[in-house]
């Protein structure tokens, strides 16, 4: 078998078994498979916060350097979500999703064997490629694979799977670091990835009925197909990398002090260049016409804020608790309360709300609850028992906010743009996660663990209240506006 035939075989999506495809509830099996990827991605994201101290000791590196084990992952993820969403339209979402499990599992195996910090960071970057292959397709697979009336429930279940991964991450990370080694934080991903490959192969419906074929070049006078926006991807990566490097330098990364101002200036210049590039690109990765659709821009901002609110406490919680004398394992169990409440609210939390509440009402109420919980976390004494209730309140509020907000965004996005729109939602989530980690480290570095952590939490509470003003009625899905 030659290389072309092998590639065609690998890129041809296989149909589900007849018994699975013919079952009237088969779409929930597909949702479950997507949830497996959502669980794995968030488990890996939340477990990292508990392993930072162990990595610092093992590699003899500072907090600002070690955090790049997380930031490198997030930067690659942000850069690749849109292009992989574009590529998925060509090769098929199912193929790309299953391939993501394979890349994620192999890179996780390599991360556990890393004997230098830069090798670990490189493995995490490759790991992010696999995560992007899954995440760029997850929302689209759910939104287009279930009936319209079940979309909010399906997205809620997916959010709950993310919450479960987030919930298990801190407690599992604390236990593995204390009783095994930091390497097992990465190796635990491997069997989950193998299971995901098998589940995706048999339970996901085909998104292409044949292998992609090469399209012949246009003849004179024929229109050219729009190319991928490579300049836009590079500008986005450069702008976000410069911003996070500036925050890391201010947090103690061993770079000259003037580098902060230079990096911030570079970030602003690249961001302005990105705006200009996206307005003129034939197929922009950020799709200005899509962003300008009523309800989409504000929804993406709320998604970013929501994950900023979620990940800052996941980083700050262990720092504050261990600084107060709580063990690493116990701190992980306490911090678990935040994502655990998030998972519960994302699935069954709406049952406690008045019947008939709209998604807009859920967003506003959830953001208000999150702000109240974070404010309580900031003012109450730092001990395991005292912070449990604030974390439960904040997590429950975020579990109401994010699924409802994502449903609003996906309803506002035209059907033909669902993959790109889903990638943009995940991009906003990743940016919020990265900023949450970077701002947490910055606050601790500038004002110390106790004072800096409390200041960041108060700021987050204010941001949560501000998010209530960003949600509003979403128009009926229509065609994409190009203006």
Image (cartoon, grey):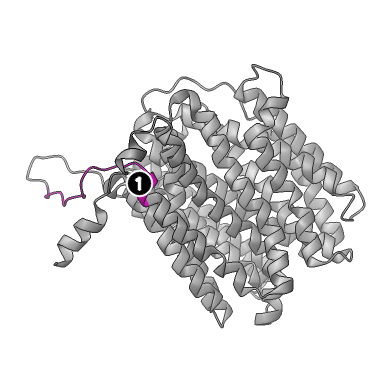
Residue 222: tell me if it is visible. yes
User: Where in the figure is residue 210, as x and y percent of width and height?
Assistant: 20, 46
Nearest the viewer among 192 and 437 is 192
- Residue drawn at (49%, 66%) of the image: 125
Taking the view exactly as shown, the residue that stands out farthest to the top is 356
Residue 349, picture quadrant: top right
Disc 1, SS: helix
Q: How many marks?
A: 1
Is residue 439 found left or right of 386 in the rendered image?
A: left
User: Where in the figure is residue 332, as x and y percent of width and height?
Assistant: 75, 59
Q: Is residue 188 above or below residue 58?
A: above
- Residue drawn at (66%, 58%) of the image: 169
Taking the view exactly as shown, the residue that stands out farthest to the right is 381
Q: Is residue 277 magenta?
A: no
Q: Is residue 477 above or below residue 210?
A: above
Is residue 196 found left or right of 451 in the rendered image?
A: left
Is residue 461 found left or right of 258 in the rendered image?
A: right
User: Where in the figure is residue 455, as x and y percent of width and height?
Assistant: 82, 52
- In this picture, which residue range is highlighted in magenta? 201-217
Q: Is residue 255 above or below residue 27?
A: below
- Residue drawn at (72%, 42%) of the image: 341
Count residues near mark 1 (Cα–Cα under 10 Å), then give few for <14, some for 14-19, many for 20+: many
Q: Which residue is mark 1?
A: 93
Residue 421, picture quadrant: top left
- Residue drawn at (43%, 48%) of the image: 136
Q: Is residue 209 magenta?
A: yes
Quarter of the image where the N terminus is located: bottom left
């Amino acid at each position: 078998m030659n290389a072309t035939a092998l590639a065609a075989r690998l890129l041809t999506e296989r149909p589900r078994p007849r018994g699975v495809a013919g079952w009237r509830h088969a779409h929930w099996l597909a949702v479950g498979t997507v949830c497996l990827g959502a669980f794995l991605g968030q488990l890996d994201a939340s477990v990292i916060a508990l392993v930072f101290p162990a990595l610092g000791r093992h590699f003899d590196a500072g907090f600002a350097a070690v955090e790049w084990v997380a930031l490198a992952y997030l930067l690659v993820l942000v850069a690749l979500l849109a292009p992989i969403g574009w590529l998925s339209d060509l090769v098929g979402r199912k193929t790309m999703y299953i391939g993501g499990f394979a890349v994620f599992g192999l890179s996780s195996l390599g991360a556990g064997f890393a004997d230098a910090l830069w090798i670990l960071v490189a493995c995490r970057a490759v790991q992010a490629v696999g995560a992007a292959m899954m995440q760029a397709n997850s929302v689209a697979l759910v939104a287009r694979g279930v009936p319209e009336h079940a979309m909010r429930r399906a997205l809620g279940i997916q959010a709950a799977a993310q919450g479960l991964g987030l919930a298990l991450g801190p407690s599992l990370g604390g236990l593995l670091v204390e009783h095994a080694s930091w390497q097992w934080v990465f190796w635990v991903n491997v069997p989950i990835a193998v299971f995901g490959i098998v589940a995706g192969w048999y339970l996901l419906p085909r998104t292409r009925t044949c292998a992609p074929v090469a399209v012949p070049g246009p003849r004179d006078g024929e229109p050219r197909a729009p190319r991928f926006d490579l300049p836009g991807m590079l500008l986005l990566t450069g702008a976000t990398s410069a911003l996070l490097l500036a925050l890391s330098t201010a947090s103690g990364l061993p770079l000259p002090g003037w580098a902060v101002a230079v990096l911030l200036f570079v970030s602003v210049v690249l961001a302005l260049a990105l705006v200009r590039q996206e307005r003129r690109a034939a197929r922009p990765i950020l799709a200005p016409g899509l962003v300008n659709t009523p309800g989409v821009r504000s929804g993406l901002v709320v998604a970013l804020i929501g994950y900023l609110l979620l990940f800052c406490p996941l980083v700050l919680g262990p720092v504050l608790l261990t600084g107060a004398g709580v063990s690493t394992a116990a701190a992980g169990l306490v911090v678990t309360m935040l994502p655990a409440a998030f998972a519960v609210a994302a699935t069954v939390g709406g049952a406690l709300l008045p019947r008939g509440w709209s998604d807009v009402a859920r967003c506003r109420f959830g953001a208000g609850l999150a702000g109240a919980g974070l404010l309580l976390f900031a003012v109450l004494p730092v001990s395991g028992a005292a912070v449990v209730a604030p974390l439960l309140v904040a997590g429950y509020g975020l579990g109401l906010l994010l699924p409802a907000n994502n449903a609003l965004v996906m309803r506002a996005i035209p059907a033909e743009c669902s993959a790109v729109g889903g990638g943009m939602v995940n991009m906003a989530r990743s940016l919020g996660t990265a900023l949450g980690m970077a701002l947490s480290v910055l606050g601790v570095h500038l004002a110390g663990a106790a004072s800096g952590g409390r200041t960041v939490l108060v700021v987050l509470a204010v941001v949560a209240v501000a998010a209530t003003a960003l949600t509003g009625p979403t128009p009926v899905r229509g065609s994409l506006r190009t203006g």
